[in-house]
Amino acid sequence: MSKVKSSETVKVVVRCRPLNRKDAAGVTGTPGGRGGIIEMDVDRGQVVLRNPRALPGEPRKTFTFDSVYDASSRQRDLYDETVRPLIHSVLDGFNGTIFAYGQTGTGKTYTMQGEWLEPERRGVIPNAFEHVFTQIARSTADRQYLVRASYLEIYREEIRDLLDPNVHAPHVPNVHTQPPRTLELRESPESGVYVRDLTSCVCKSVKEIQELMNVGNQVRSVGATDMNEHSSRSHTLFLITVECSQTGPDGRQHIRVGRLNLVDLAGSERQAKTGVHGERLKEAATINLSLSALGNVISALADGRGGHVPYRDSKLTRLLQDSLGGNAKTVMVATLGPAPQHYEETLTTLRYANRAKNIQNQPRVNEDPKDALLREFQKEIARLRAQLSHREGRGKHRKEEGWDGEGDEEGEEEVEKERKLQEEKEAIREDGSLLAVEKQRLLGEKEIMMGDLRKEQDTTEQLTAKYKAMESKLLVGGRNIMDHTNEQQKTLEIRRQEIAEQSRREREILQQVMVQDEETLELRETFSSLQQEVEAKTKKLKKLYAKLQCVKAEIQDVNDEHVRSRQELEQTQNELTRELKFKYLIIENFIPPEEKNKIMNRLTFDPEEDQWKFQLLPPSESQMKKRLASAVGYKRPISQYARVALAMGAHSRYRAENIMFLELDMSPPTTVSLDHWPSEVGPNCSSSPTDSALYRERATRVRKSRSWCQAPRAITSSSSTVSLATHSTATPSTAQ
Ligand code: ADP
Ligand code: MG
């Protein structure tokens, strides 16, 4: 069930970063950070863009937004005015999205993340973390909350889970050997487009959620060191889901689920300007394609004619489907740089931002969705509580039956029971009046009772631990607000919010007055003479003519822009075609046609994923050759042939299959001292028959231990020596 709320437009704010040293170097003659091309009227929410190559008299371009933040703006200003109301809505059960859009280096990451360690320079994300948990602590005590977070990036059109538990091996901190797994997008009528199997972690505090973000960033930062500029080469999305349960007027528990998407997009940039090639160019091409897909979605939605919206053109637009034209409250922060050399990009960003203002969303409170995790938690906690009280009740029941242990506490009671059992056992042992058999039986019974008691204790402990762990994950409102400073801070925040609201209303009124002024100018005019009328009309004509010139210039600009982006798309297309040709060349020349056909027949297109996929082959008996089972006694699977050869001892090749089978001569070596050899007689030559007999007898003894020492050369009866000898003599001849 969901409450329908009237539609509202996407809120668009623009932020300009200060001129930095690099920019200033390009601004000739304008030291000290002056000379940017952007002027901002913060009170009216207007941006005036100056064309550095404008002809004299050419009017400047003016855009009006919900609010604008100039170079001197603080992170807090943007948060209080623009983001704070959105977070409140998320806590009330709306979906909310904040995304930063702009050219590389204009401050998207600065706006979204900022400097975490400096409170004044913290961006939207850390402030939102703080805000969510503070609001929960301040809410009424009848509310229960469950907060969980997910973190993903879209890199080269692949969705990567940055909290993938397989990447974050707990035993090896900071070591990520494999890239995070890639995930698929799915769509359901209940929860819209979602990422299947995305890791989500329950968080109980700001510290925990920050920790999650750090863990995710570590996976990204690996890329930043390995691959230059990786961090800005992917779109990241940090998703916080806040579930809140509260008793409704009907006396029943109702759950509201708010999802907050915090998106930091990769920067849009002109390929020609960055001068990238190869892989880098492909990366840039995918970024630009997904950003232009985003641009197309914004244009189609802003058009308001209800035509086809190309959400499916990229993963980014599919993920943001609900945020753009769907069930969400959305804030777009368009970031600009003041440098004149980036005039075209700045103008493009402003145009996109201007278009996005017209997108109508239909946000509604997500009430009682089927997949609320909070309900699962509550059910599980209730089940555990029931189990525990059942156990407690059983304990009491047993007590009445004779377990008359003392002590109020359950734990004490158990200890008491155990002590009593021990005493009873001792008493039985010492009781002289009992027969030995009877004694044994009674002791056995008591032993079983003690075993049961211990098991019972263990189970209760486990249940209590699980119960406590689950309960601690549910955050209850009305806690943690005890101290006075907290109250003061709350008042201060309310004041700030009021001021922000006030200035927003003032800006709105000023903008309305500006529009009305133009419309009512004509009505207020009364002419006393013809001459006066002519003058007034001429003046008006001039004004209209100037406006016409503006529109003409705008048309020219848009045309130029189209030509430029078309050229870029053509360049990307050329690159891709060249690569395709290269792959074709490899396929045609190196893959046999029948193999190619086999592969082609197995490929199917998955429209959901927009990808080609391999069909799995059904395993057939003949294809699935079983691996030989490892046989006991052998160190690895061994073929039938090898086993037969081994049994027959036919070939030395199979002999060493298992070292245990080698029949080593384990008797200690029998050695003779060389001093005993007749000094003039070497082992190879014998001078007399008696010497020869003596030698043969000794040689037999030596031969026995041939495993340890070289056999005398004269004895060549062993087959191995023969084969070795033949081998060694054969080798040179074959070599010749
Ligand atoms: P992007 O994410 O758009 O590529 P970054 O957020 O990384 O750009 O910003 C580039 C540089 O500009 C960073 O060094 C950042 O600190 C600085 N910067 C951006 N916006 C501001 C700002 N509003 N105030 C001060 N410094 C800024
Ligand atoms: Mg960035």
Image (tube, rainbow, N blue to C red):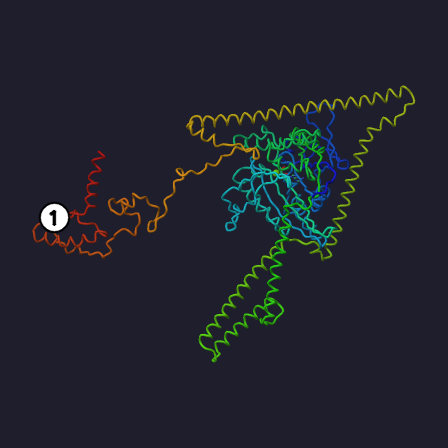
Q: Is residue 50 left or right of residue 397?
A: right
Residue 693 locus on image (x, y percent): 10, 53
* Numbered marks: total: 1
Residue designated by label 1: 685
Q: Residue furthest left?
A: 689
Quadrant the N terminus occupies: top right
Q: Quadrant of residue 593?
A: top left
Vertical placement of 668 versus 193: above or below? below
* Mark 1 secondary-structure assignment: loop
Q: Quadrant of residue 81?
A: top right
Estimate the x, y position of residue 196 in percent, counting from the top left: 57, 41
Q: Is residue 144 visible?
A: yes
Residue 262 at x, y percent in the picture: 64, 41
Mark 1 within 8 Å of ligand 2, using the beta carbon: no
Mark 1 packing: few (<14 Cα in 10 Å), some, or many (20+)?
A: few
- The amino acid type, in three-letter code, at marker 1 is Cys
Q: Name the residue located 47 percent from the left edge and 26 percent from the top edge.
A: 584
Residue 681 position in % (x across, y down): 12, 51
Residue at the far bottom: name it: 433
Ligand 2 lies in which image quarter?
A: top right
In the rendered image, the vertical position of residue 192 relative to residue 568, given as above or below: below
Question: Who is closer to the viewer here, 275 or 55?
Answer: 275
- The residue at the point 84 percent across, 21 percent down is 537
Q: Quadrant of residue 359?
A: top right
Q: Is residue 572 above or below residue 79?
A: above
